[in-house]
Image: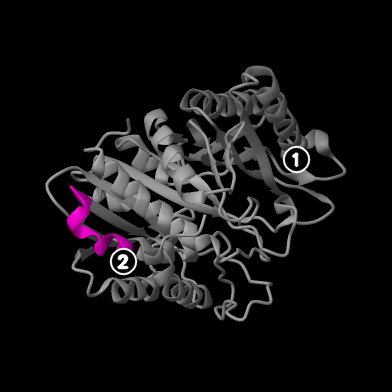
Amino acid sequence: MTPPPEVLEVVPDIVELRRSIHRHPELGLDTPRTQSLVLEALDGLGLRVRTGRATTSVVADLEGGDGPTVLLRADMDALALDEDTDLDFTSVESGRMHACGHDAHTAMLVGAARVLAARRDELPGRVRFMFQPGEEGWGGAKVMIDEGVLDGVDAAFALHVSPNLRTGGIAWRRGALLASSDEFAIDIVGRGGHASSPHWAVDPVPVACEVVLALQSMVTRSVHAFDPAVVGVSRIRAGTTHNVIPERASLLGTVRAVSEHTRSHVLDRIRQVTDGIAAAHGCTAELQIHEGYPVTVNDDRAVGFMVDVARGVVGDAPVLELPSPMMGSEDFSYVLQQVPGAMCFLGACPPDLRNPLAAPACHSNRMVIDEQAMATGVALHAALAAGYLSRGGSFG
């Protein structure tokens, strides 16, 4: 389906905006250049705009008539890696790349603001545009919530581009869409000594190895197969040379789960397994857990509404139900903990690839998207907001 004329009219500008953001990616909660570009792009639309205090966020309200408030969200930050694409607008910032599509998210939301501002008189309520830094591990959504971004909000929606879906298509799921993400650090503490005399030392290295294997067995034997978790140890570090038994062996890892019940259970079991194995070998264990993003849970009614709206927007492009949650994580989860809403994936597979699964995925140094998908993103954002308000704040 060809996007409506008002959407096509804004596409050249938002593509230019996306490329400008892409050339100069910013990290974490401090994205002043991107914030400035967003403010400039929103200027003249008659929005009530405010910026964050603890982060470089932008919140813009489009006031229609009396009625509910619907929030549309885009994230603005990039990732800490070097870009390896041949784009004309490749990143010029060393060690920084928009490898997750946030540049497109921001530009699409600006486009939606322009489309909806032109239809202000038709909107029986308020649209709040949430431009958020710090999604990539910094919890920017939580910072903005603490500053009041959800005050008075009745529903919330977000889109996430995916190069592994056909351009313009939508992938969705009721309930858990994305996993929680937690990190752990374990130090196994023994007693150092000479490598020739392990009986005079307490070697933490084999104990650390046993912990790694036991954590994998713990998942397969104590976690329900249809309420899964992933526990991965991604770094092991111990010792300084070949003939010294070190005092410590350190592990770093991550935990992913798709329900809060399993998440809590696994974090508790990590402590039990680690303490037990360390004690059995005369070591002690020091465990630190950093709780990251919660499970991203779509509201069933909001997803049904989103899918109905999407089918009217995307035309012949696929609208696919995901068979299972994705094990990535998202801080839009904090928003969905407080207000009903939904997130879906927007297909943006590069046009030269027949098989979307062959495309470099999000977080790849070679990740690229089909910018034609941005028109669909603008149209879907606008249709979700207008449709929700026209129903008086109902998903039915």
Q: Which residue is mark 2?
A: 114
Residue at image point 40% right, 71% down:
9
Residue at image point 60% right, 63% down:
369
Q: Amino acid at mark 2?
A: Arg
The answer to whether residue 174 is above or below residue 12 is above
Residue 77 x, y percent position in the rendering: 45, 63
Relative horizontal placement of residue 352, taking residue 304 as reference (left or right)? right
Q: Residues within 10 Å of mark 1 (few under 14, many from 20)?
A: many
| Residues shaded magenta | 113-126
Residue 325 x, y percent position in the rendering: 57, 34
Name of the residue lying farthest toward the right: 196
Residue at image point 42% right, 59% down:
378
Q: Is residue 122 magenta?
A: yes
Q: Nearer the viewer, mark 2 or mark 1?
A: 2
Q: Is residue 296 magenta?
A: no
Tell which of 322 and 232 is nearer to you. 322
Q: Amino acid at mark 1?
A: Val
Q: Which element is circle 2 on?
A: helix
Residue at image point 63% right, 25% down:
273
* Residue 147 seen by the camera: no
Residue 386 x, y percent position in the rendering: 29, 49
Q: Earlier in the sequence, mark 2 or mark 1?
A: 2
Q: Residues within 10 Å of mark 2 (few under 14, many from 20)?
A: many
Q: Quadrant of residue 128?
A: bottom left
In this figure, which colouring scheme has been used for the structure? one colour
- Quadrant for the C terminus, please: top left
Relative horizontal placement of residue 313, taking residue 357 as reference (left or right)? left
Residue 259: mark in rendering: none
Relative horizontal placement of residue 161, taking residue 394 as reference (left or right)? right
Residue 205: mark in rendering: 1
